[in-house]
Amino acid sequence: MLNSCSVRNLLLQRQCFGGKADRIAYDELFRLMSPVQPPYWCRPGSPPSLVFRAKFDEYTHVFDMRKRRTIVKGRFQGGAVAYIFADELPLFTSIYAKDKDSLTFYEAEILELLRREGPMNIALMKEFTGLLSKKITPVLHKLQQKFLVFEDQDDNEWDRAWYPLETEFPDVDKEKFNKIQALRTIIIRFAYLNVFINIEMINSFYKIPMDEIREAVMELESEKKLVKVTIGKEQGYVMDEDIPFLKKELQPLKSIFVLHRNDFLVKSNEYWLKEKYKHGKYNVLQYILIDGEFRGTVVGFFKNGPFIIEDVVLDMDDTEADSRKQEILEAVRLANNAASSPIKRYRGKNLSSELMDIR
């Protein structure tokens, strides 16, 4: 009998929620979690982040990795902006490159321009082609998805240079992996980090067709690298080597983390989170992870500035919600600016009126 509490214990450890990562462990975690998206609702050019996992200045470290092209920007997971290690371009090209041998007229024109004239920004492309920015930008994004151009995001500025990918990374072997081989690699990474997984979770994070995921999982299952199991009422897969650990009765780390909507763990569970935690009046700003389990949301309004936090919504009874109230509120404040984004309500009750009652 496998234990769901042990699943959460191992998940929190492997995702560095239990003990924060040093630079070496952080880089390995970044690789396992790739493609890594920037935080949800951030300014264009913001670097990616593994929030609450680093025990050092993460922003400076990731910014430096991006500047040195240790990590590179691309479009993955249905066209979303994300980052991978440059040395893994062959792996992710085999998974995500779309129709790279079939170019539209404008795609061919822009690519040929960059190959002929060298790197340039969108303003220069406008001068050379006479096209408007609103026409050029989506063409560049399509070329990114085909792994034919590279956007050099070495800082947070808007004016960025674009290059043909082959001139900046000439040694990339785009034929190194076939797609199923590459999928097997990332699915094992995914299983290691999430511990207990299913097909929907893999699709939720990587945005890869279900039939391809099933084929890769079936191969891993036939080789005993993944084992089909039932934990509680849920059926899924775990790594064979994890089974002895998951038979133990280990409690997860008592902890509360408020995670943005592009976080690895949120994206892994997005397919059910977005259905369970819909709110009729407000936007879901963040999800609340309590003892390794999603138990609620922070809701309100996104702004280009401080978010407006209207309420903290929880999936727990009154006794538990009251006993952990201060922990939860502190976690919400830690994930936001407490001064500019004050929490208005907790489970529908106005916090300012509570303070008045106390006085």
Image (cartoon, rainbow, N blue to C red):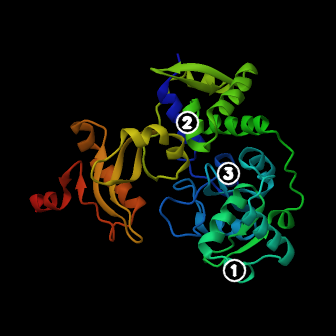
Q: Amino acid at mark 2?
A: Met
- The residue most toward the right is 171
Marks 1/3 in contact by CB < 8 Å: the verdict is no
According to the image, label 3 marks what residue?
Answer: 25
Q: Tag 3: Cα neighbours inside 10 Å, few (<14), some, or many (≥20)?
A: some
Residue located farthest toward the top when viewing the structure as drawn: 1
Q: CA distance from mark 2 to mark 1?
A: 44 Å
Q: Quote the CA–CA distance across marks 3 and 2.
A: 24 Å
In the rendered view, does 17 fall on the left or right side of 224?
Answer: left
Of mark 2 and mark 1, the one earlier in the sequence is 1
Q: Secondary structure at mark 3?
A: helix
Query: What amino acid type should be assigned to the residue bearing mark 3?
Result: Ala
Look at discs 3 and 2 and give the one toward the viewer.
2
How far apart in space, not on screen, are marks 1 and 3 (Cα)? 48 Å
- Residue denoted by label 2: 201
Q: Secondary structure at mark 2?
A: helix
Query: What residue type is disc 1 on?
Result: Gly
Residue on which disc 1 sits: 130
Q: Earlier in the sequence, mark 3 or mark 2?
A: 3
- Single out the mark in the foreground, 2 or 1: 1
Q: Residue at x 53, y 19 (%)?
A: 230
Image coords of residue 298 (percent x, y) = 35, 52
Q: In percent of the image, x 75 and y 81: which residue is there?
A: 128
Q: Quadrant of the C terminus?
A: bottom left
Q: Which residue shows up at 80% across the image and 72% down it?
A: 114
